[in-house]
Image (cartoon, rainbow, N blue to C red):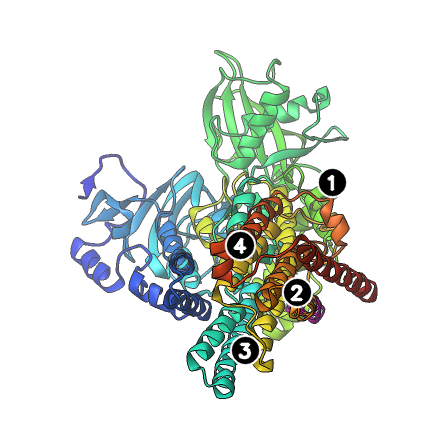
């Protein structure tokens, strides 16, 4: 309920009547982002069920269920449900981001209604309302200032610029503007009043405000699909199509040749089980789940699991300057007084006496408890260096304040030093304004301009400081009428985060380019880029981008790596232009202005501590410690996952070749069957954990961060990898068939030959694991790298094989005969021979590819 308030508020006019406000609220809707067109759970789940990968999982589960393998069926169906759950979570992130945007506006507003001053919920504001704005409050809606008294506004959430901007009063008919820049009469929803006060006429609410337009664009932006997802779907469809077609042909051929249609159906099902690529989605799910856990140990929260593998292929990191590469906290970086200059660094232990007065009066010219980040920087500098000196004056009384004015960009504060003493005046502001207060002559003014230019070229925000004395008690109308003495210049900057330059260097050595995007001034952007080690061949500004069409923009961003005065919608255009150029884009940010571009990038990375809810909800990854260097660790882990996925898929491809061959060849050639469903299930119990857990646990290669990233668009499963997997599988198949044929005339005949061939196949399987572990080196080097998961698989699988050979009931189930030690040794020797041949072929292929 609206509550009248007593204190007088600035403003003009009685505002709207309650009836007018209700009508406009009916027409425009509440001052919040719309919640319509929300996708509900049934629709999201239905869309997930239509995914090809999920259909294959369900199909494989049904096959196992029909075969009576309930455990395998339940496992696959469980992964299908997990897949649906992941899709549901991902699709609801947009609604969460919009909800976070709605929470940014101030929940209460002071407004005139029916000639009364009322406190209303901000969602009830409408166009035409007159509202009061005071220091420390968030602006509840876009508005045009009618009155402004020394108002300064922090618009960093919308522009990325860390320095507050001045505001002035405007008149009806003022042209539309965008956030950013001094002396604008417009204020924007979500921005923060850090100084002064005023009254404003509401011009836009809800989705029509600047923050609302960001929310609308966020709701329509499509997240870029991760490259591996696209490749995985294509590969799974190819394997599934070929496998199902081969199984149908096998069943038909067997039935026509032998007339035994029941056996033909069983042979077809066995081949389908051997050929269905269920390991591919299984491996991807486990790799991404365990990858998310490993990233959490490095203070990186994963919100979109597909971004984990994309980290390994990232080619461009777009970093927001304010709050991401910098600390989003202004600090005094340089001082100039009496012809001396001083760089004020974090390591400085003392402040020379020559600069004490300059810092003293910079503090006196600031509020005692400031919101302004520059005034806070002066206070911190004073506490750091002047705490035990006579230059801090906690007991002085503020007598008068002369605020910043558009015609004189300086402010003065008059202090009473003690009873009966003179008044002390401290002034700070734009150098040219303070020079005017001090009545500088032409030579001194020219020298001042040169000093200011040098400091500005270093990316510093330059303010001048002056002092004066007044006898009182009659005060002049303007601060210009005091007598001032010029004290010097202060240079303020938003400092670089510790470790950023090292992180950028690590990215460059890994072949990952770094671009900086900011709403700040080009000179400031260049200075920060140089400190961070980012290439500074040129700066592309928002004004220039506004004049470029999409083809021209793609051409310009191919060379530029520093972008200044960028608006939120332009950040989105930049990310889309980079992606159109073939880059795999990682975008970091922490403000509302970053949310659409975070969602559009292949990898959106938000700051967890300083970041807004909007950025965190829209991002794929969140740096919990706000440490830019954690991103380098995430890229390292992404490359490890990328390399281990290649090893796992090479193994899966290789191991399926002998299984398919031993299921198909006997059928086509009229031999006794070698493999049935029970044999395939046994092999799957080795293949699934080996291809997922064993390869996921593999340590990264030593040169993982000195390689170039995989080329954008290049398949993870390239031709050499496919050829290597197929070739290694053929070698193992040949060794198992040789064992089978050589043993057909021996003791036990068919059953013994089947058992020996199976032993050769199982042991050859372990040889394929070792060869795939050494995909980029050698199996012998891979053996020296401990892998506990592989040892566990071996400890379980080899005794299980021994039981299948030794226990009569299990021998009968598998169709085996008892084997002698010599027969087992012969099968083992054949497996060792296949391992040696595969290692020789792998060595030759590595030599050819180098």
Residue at which label 2 appears: 557
x 82%, y 67%: residue: 848
Q: Horizontal placement of 728 versus 748: left or right? A: right
Which residues, given as a range, are shown in magenta?
A: 712-733
Q: Quadrant of residue 207?
A: bottom left
- 10 Å crowding of disc 4: few (<14), some (14-19), many (20+): many
The main secondary structure of the magenta stretch is helix
Residue at which label 3 appears: 242
Q: Where in the figure is residue 752, as x and y percent of width and height?
A: 60, 63
SS under mark 3: helix
N-terminal-most mark, 1 or 4: 1
N-terminal-most mark, 2 or 4: 2
Q: Nearer the viewer, mark 3 or mark 4?
A: 4
Task: Report if the CB atoms under discs 1 and 3 are less than 8 Å apart.
Answer: no
Q: Where in the figure is residue 402, as x and y percent of width and height?
A: 48, 33
- The quarter of the image holding the N terminus is top left
């Amino acid at each position: 309920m609206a509550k009248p308030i007593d204190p007088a508020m600035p403003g003009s006019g009685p505002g709207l009547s309650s009836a007018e406000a209700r009508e406009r609220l009916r027409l425009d809707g509440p001052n919040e982002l719309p919640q319509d067109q929300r996708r509900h759970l049934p629709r999201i789940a239905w869309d997930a069920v239509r995914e090809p990968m999920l259909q294959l999982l369900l199909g494989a589960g049904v096959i196992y269920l029909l075969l009576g393998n309930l455990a395998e069926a339940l496992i696959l169906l469980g992964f299908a449900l997990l897949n649906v759950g992941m899709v549901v979570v991902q699709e609801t992130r947009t609604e969460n981001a919009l909800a976070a945007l709605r929470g940014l506006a101030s929940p209460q507003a002071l407004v005139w209604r029916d000639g009364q001053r009322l406190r209303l919920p901000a969602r009830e504001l409408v166009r035409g309302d007159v509202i009061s704005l005071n220091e420390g409050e968030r602006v509840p809606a876009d508005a045009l200032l009618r009155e402004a008294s020394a108002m300064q506004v922090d618009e960093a959430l919308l522009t990325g610029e860390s320095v507050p901007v001045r505001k002035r009063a405007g008149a009806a008919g003022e042209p539309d503007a965008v956030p950013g820049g001094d002396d604008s009469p417009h204020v924007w929803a979500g921005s923060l009043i850090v100084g002064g006060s005023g009254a404003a006429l509401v011009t836009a609410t809800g989705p029509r405000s600047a923050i609302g337009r960001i929310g609308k664009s966020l709701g329509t932006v499509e997240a870029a699909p991760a490259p591996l997802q696209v490749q995985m779907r294509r590969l799974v469809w190819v394997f599934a199509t070929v496998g199902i077609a081969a199984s149908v042909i096998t069943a038909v051929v067997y039935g026509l040749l032998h007339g035994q249609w029941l056996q033909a159906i069983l042979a077809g099902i066995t081949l389908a089980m051997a050929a269905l690529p269920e390991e591919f989605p299984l491996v991807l799910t486990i790799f991404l789940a365990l990858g998310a856990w490993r990233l959490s140990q490095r203070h990186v929260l994963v919100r979109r699991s597909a971004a984990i593998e994309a980290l390994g292929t990232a080619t461009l990191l777009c970093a927001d300057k304010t709050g991401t590469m910098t600390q989003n906290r202004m600090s005094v970086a340089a001082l100039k007084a009496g012809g001396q200059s001083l760089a004020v660094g974090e390591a400085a232990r003392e402040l020379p006496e020559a600069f004490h007065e300059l810092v003293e009066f910079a503090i006196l010219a600031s509020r005692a408890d400031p919101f302004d980040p520059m005034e806070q920087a002066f206070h911190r500098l004073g506490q750091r260096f002047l705490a035990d000196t006579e230059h801090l004056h906690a007991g002085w009384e503020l007598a008068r304040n002369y605020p910043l004015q558009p015609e004189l960009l300086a402010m003065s504060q008059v202090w009473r030093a003690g009873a009966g003493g003179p008044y002390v005046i401290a002034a700070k502001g734009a150098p040219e304004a303070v020079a005017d207060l001090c009545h500088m002559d032409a030579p001194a003014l020219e020298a001042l301009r040169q000093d200011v230019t040098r400091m500005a070229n270093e990316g510093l925000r330059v303010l001048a400081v002056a002092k004066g004395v007044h006898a009182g008690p009659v005060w002049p109308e303007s601060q210009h009428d005091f007598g001032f003495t010029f004290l010097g210049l202060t240079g303020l900057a938003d400092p670089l985060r510790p470790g950023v330059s090292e992180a950028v260097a690590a990215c460059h050595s890994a072949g990952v380019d770094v671009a900086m995007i900011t709403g700040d001034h080009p000179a400031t952007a260049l200075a920060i880029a140089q400190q961070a080690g980012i290439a500074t061949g040129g700066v592309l500004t928002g004004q220039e981008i506004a004049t470029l069409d999409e083809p021209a923009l793609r051409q310009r961003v191919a060379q530029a790596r520093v972008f200044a005065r960028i608006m939120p919608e332009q950040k989105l255009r930049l990310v889309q232009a980079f992606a159109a150029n073939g880059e795999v884009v990682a975008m970091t940010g922490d403000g509302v202005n970053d949310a659409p571009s975070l969602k559009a990038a292949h990898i959106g990375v938000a700051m967890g501590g300083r970041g807004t809810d909007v950025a965190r909800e829209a991002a794929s990854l969140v740096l919990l410690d706000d440490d830019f260097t954690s991103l380098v660790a995430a890229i390292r882990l992404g490359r490890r996952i990328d390399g281990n996925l290649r090893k796992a898929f090479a193994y899966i491809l290789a191991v399926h070749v002998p299984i398919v061959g031993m299921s198909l060849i006997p059928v086509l050639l009229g031999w006794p069957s070698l493999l049935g469903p029970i044999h395939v299930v046994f092999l799957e119990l080795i293949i699934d954990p080996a291809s997922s857990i064993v390869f996921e646990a593999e340590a990264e290669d030593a040169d993982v961060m000195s390689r170039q990233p995989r080329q954008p668009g290049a398949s993870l499963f390239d031709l050499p990898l496919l050829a290597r997997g197929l070739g290694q599988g053929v070698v193992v198949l040949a060794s198992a068939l040789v064992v089978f044929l050589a043993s057909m005339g021996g003791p036990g005949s068919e059953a013994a030959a089947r058992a020996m061939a199976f032993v050769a196949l199982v042991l050859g399987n372990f040889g394929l694991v070792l060869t795939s572990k050494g995909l980029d080196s050698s199996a012998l080097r891979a053996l020296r790298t401990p892998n506990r998961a592989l040892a566990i698989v071996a400890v379980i699988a080899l005794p299980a094989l021994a039981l299948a050979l030794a226990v009569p009931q299990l021998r009968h189930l598998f169709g085996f005969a008892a084997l002698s030690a010599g027969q087992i040794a012969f099968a083992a020797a054949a497996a060792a021979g296949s391992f040696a041949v595969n290692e020789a072929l792998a060595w030759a292929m590595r030599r050819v590819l180098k």
